[in-house]
Image (cartoon, rainbow, N blue to C red):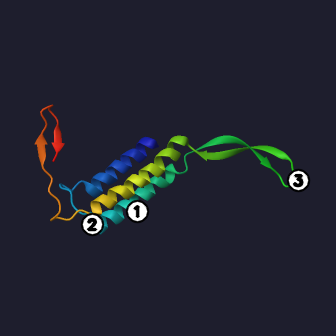
Amino acid sequence: PAVTVSHAITNLAVASWGATSRLEPVGEASRAKWLKEIEWLLVPVQHIVMMKPAVKMLDDGTRVEVMEQQLRQDIADALPALRRIDVALFGVLSRFRAEDLEVTWQSNPQGGVEGG
């Protein structure tokens, strides 16, 4: 299931941003599509849980051992970070203006490419 969700997110990214050949403001249609479909893809991930033993107190004071659902730790850590990155990315892309942006690439003596 994780690989399937990963492929679906990759395909969504290609469908949403694949035609973008330069840095430019994100259109409202692309942004709305991305936000709607990424949410659809992340909903099942939010329900990947582990069962954890816990103690529950009943009304009469009796302690009962039960199994509690807990979001997997890797997902609990990654989902909020993913959402923050998503918001930050849209924040940056929404500030681009055609007249404000010029990107040039220079050859790096160590063999790489760096922005300028």
Q: Which residue: 33% across, 63% down? A: 31
Callouts 1 and 3 close, C-beta under 8 Å: no
Residue neighbourhood size for the residue with mark 2, other residues' Cα within 10 Å, grouped as few (<14), some (14–19), many (≥20): few
Which residue matches tag 1? 36
- Circle 1: element type: helix
Q: Position of residue 52 (x, y in %)?
A: 66, 41
Q: Position of residue 71 (x, y in %)?
A: 57, 46
Mark earlier in primary sequence (2, 3): 2
- Circle 3: element type: loop
State the residue in front, 113 or 63: 113
Mark earlier in primary sequence (1, 2): 2
Q: CA distance from mark 2 to mark 3?
A: 59 Å
Which residue matches tag 2? 27
Does 112 sit left or right of 68 as displayed? left
The image quadrant of residue 26 is bottom left
Q: Which residue: 72% across, 43% down? A: 54
Which residue matches tag 3? 60
Does 103 sit left or right of 70 as displayed? left
Residue 5 is labelled as none
Q: CA distance from mark 1 to mark 3?
A: 46 Å
The image quadrant of residue 88 is bottom left
Say which amino acid is labelled 3: Asp
